[in-house]
Image (cartoon, rainbow, N blue to C red):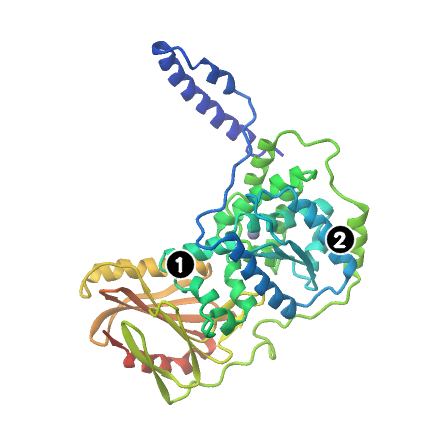
Amino acid sequence: MNRIGSGAGSRVTTAVRTMRLRVEQLANTAGLVLGMLLLLVPGAAAQRTELKPGFNMFSPQQDVELGKRAAADAKKQLPSCNDPKVDAYLTELGMHLASKLPTNGVKYPFEFHCVNDKAINAFALPGGYVFVNRGAIEAGDNEGQLAAVMAHELSHVALRHGTNQVTKAEWAQGIFSIASGIFGDSTGGSLLTQLGAFAAGGVLLRYSRTAESQADVMGTQVLYDAGYDPRAMAQFFEKLEAETKGKNPPEFLSDHPNPEHRVGRVDEEIERLGPIQPNARRDSAEFEAIKREVLALPVVKKPTPGAPGAATPPAAPSHNYAAYQASSYSLNYPDNWKKYPDSDGRGASFAPEGGVLDDGSGHSALAYGLIIGVAKAKGDSNDASALQSATSQVIQDLQKANPSMKITRQGEHLRLNGHPGLSTYLSNDSPGGGQETDWVITVLRPTGLVYFICVAPQSAYDEYDKTFSAILDSVRLK
Ligand SMILES: [Zn+2]
């Protein structure tokens, strides 16, 4: 179990060598810095990684407020284990871990709930609302592995990854203008009321690989500080990776995407933490009893995405159109679709009833409809290379948010309301199961790159193609 030990060691040595050279140079002239040499003797253990929450336009109090509303909704929508013994056990374990969590003095109202779902998964909403699937308890070989999953989730809370992700998306001229949409205005225009709090909360659970790696590292520290053998973290991920080779990759990995060298990075942190106490906790009789209890719970069947009854396809788009006016464009859309204007008045989404789906893990996603946005870009409306590069940027941002998205056709020129545009076709996993087609049309305007994303499942795309064309024909750019 010393995969990266020698590599890390040689890095330390090199750093020491460089430092020594500098110290020697300095010593020649000043002779004051000899103390530093002592601190940097080769072989000294590296210190634990310091992690802090990233830039965030929300306050920790807003994390709590948002998490609380989303958690109330999650409790309504997700099947509960309905077993007070299990919840009490999760709460005791969770609170013990949370007591070692570096929260910068913020007091989060931690809650822990068991979800009756056999998928190996867990999630934490901002503010400290942690949901653990029975599948994660059943998959744990010992208490340490369950504690590892929970410490990972709690680290997302402490590092405030949910609202940090939203901040970053918003900062990059977000594909979805979410931050203001979540809180919205009191007139009911908020995403929260339109999509439901938990669905909106799903947006908060889309972590980057960097966020995942941070949660792994902090989770390992929390595990260690709480008296557990931290190697349980690496063992849990090794277990997940082994399952990835099977037919159904663990759901945990779709919510918590694998950073590169996940296990290696955890092992490295374990080395930084220092020697593992011989009496470190690994398992407990309580865990074994709770696991038996959970295994005996009745199974709640989950509707499979795409299966009959899971989601009824929306009604066909109406041939009657309603007008929509934004600050930099206007268009007509089928009058049986709903409009979801972004709060800044630039972007908007249009979808039929039933066109916005929960992808099965609490993430809301547009399965049928149209998304319009304006991304930051400079250049003249006739500048083909500026249009090309701004379009590539938007496509890359989309692919970042949708890892299975692939370009199927690109670089075709067209005109939108007389202005030169680019057409790109992409394929992606449809939230309703199967594949979807995404047709992206981009036009460069003084306000930035205006993009239109037409979305429908591949199997239904032909039925929607005419509607998308009619909408695009109606676009008037200002
Ligand atoms: Zn995660």
Residue 251, image quadrant: bottom right
When the figure is inspected, residue 380 is found, relative to residue 93, above or below; the finding is below
Q: Which mark is residue 129?
A: none
- What SS does tag 2 mark? helix
Residue type at mark 2: give it: Tyr
Tell me the CA gap for discs 1 and 2.
38 Å
Dot 1 surroundings within 10 Å: few (below 14), some, or many (20 or more)?
A: some
- The residue positioned 34% from the left and 60% from the top of the image is 394
Q: Which residue is mark 1?
A: 170
- What SS does tag 1 mark? helix
- The residue positioned 36% from the left and 11% from the top of the image is 30
Q: Confirm if mark 2 falls within 8 A of ligand 1.
A: no
Residue contact between numbered discs 1 and 2, judged by CB atoms under 8 Å: no
Compare residues 206 and 204 and report the one nearer the observer: 204
Q: Is residue 239 visible?
A: no
Q: Position of residue 382 (x, y in %)?
A: 18, 65
Q: Is residue 46 left or right of residue 325?
A: right
When the figure is inspected, residue 451 is found, relative to residue 226, above or below; the finding is below
Q: Which residue is mark 2?
A: 89
Going from N to C along the chain, the mark reached first, 1 or 2, is 2
The quadrant of the image that shows the N terminus is: top right
